[in-house]
Amino acid sequence: MLFKLATLALVGSALAQRPANTSICDYYTTALLKENTAANQATLLTLVVNTAVIGNYTKPNVGIMVPGILASGMYNGTMVNLLPYFDGGLASSNNGTAAVAMNFLDDGGAVPLMMNMPANGTTYLLTHLYQYFGVLLGCSMQGPSATSAFPSYQGEASQYSVHKYMDLSAAEVGYFITQVGLAAASFGVATADVTAVGMALASLFDYSCAPPTTVIKAQGPQLQAICIDSTCPVSPNATCAAYAPAMQPLVANASLAMGEGVNSTSSMMSGMASGTATGTMMPSITASSGAGKLVAGGVMAAAAGLVVLVL
């Protein structure tokens, strides 16, 4: 199955230009999986999102290497390590009332993702990502309920609320967006369409103090900015009063945090000195081999510039 899907993806590099009246999701589902069904749209989003998270796992592909969100790497001269937000190293997840440490990788890790699954058991992080990106890419076959073949987005309405305790920087959000762009390009998505995806993600997530925006119609306007530290560009229509002061996440497990975040003592001292923590500490991170050199040319322009571009 994986070989068949990846082989079909090779067609992407030779595809004709996508018609303006056909969504990215509908077009590439048909081009790569032949039939534009809800199940195939779900498969397409699973392939792209899983690749963005863990890197290339389908072979062959069109030859674009994807390090993946969980791999550390360089973005615009800054080292980025997003893994501690996923493995419980940092108390950066919002449980609805407070910042807590959550291990999103404890149900099989990368193994089920390599089998085109979100996890071994019940999980919401990856399934919500499939659904959310399905909306962003215009998947026309998404159903209205959680029991549909490819459900509409069932997650939290405000992405700011989900990410508010992470204090993400411009480099971290840019690295995330780059991996999404590379993942799409690795399946043969045209540079123009990768650019469109990047623009959509950046406009939603990349500007601090951004006003409420509607992504899911049924959920209405919500705060969506996830880039909230002092390095993030400020929205031209800034509504900063709607956002809480950004605070660096506390270290929950020092060995897993890998130099990210702050401990409780340093957080208190920083707060006494400046009133808020602004995310200016330089993390100690080891880069994955070659990860900072993998984005180039059209894909870099399409997927990574914070001023030029955009879950």
Image (cartoon, grey):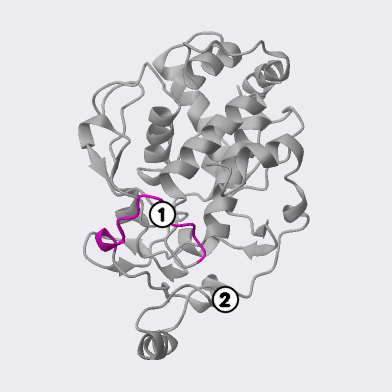
Kindly report which numbered mark, 2 or 1, lies closer to the viewer in this rendering. Answer: 1
Question: At 47% across and 68% down in the image, what residue appears?
Answer: 230
The disc at residue 270 is none
User: Would you place residue 72 above or below residue 205 in this image?
Assistant: below
Residue at 78% over, 55% down = 290
Which residues fall within the magenta stretch?
Answer: 231-243
Give above or below for 275 relative to 117.
below
Q: Is residue 240 magenta?
A: yes
Q: Which amino acid type is shown beneath numbered disc 1?
A: Ile
Q: Percent from the top left, x then y, of residue 287? A: 70, 63
Q: Where, quadrant-wise, is the C terminus in this rendering?
A: top left
Residue type at mark 2 is: Gly
Query: Callout 2: helix, strand or loop?
Result: loop
Up-down: is 183 above or below 76?
A: above
In the picture, the quarter occupied by the N terminus is top right
| Residue tagged 1 | 226
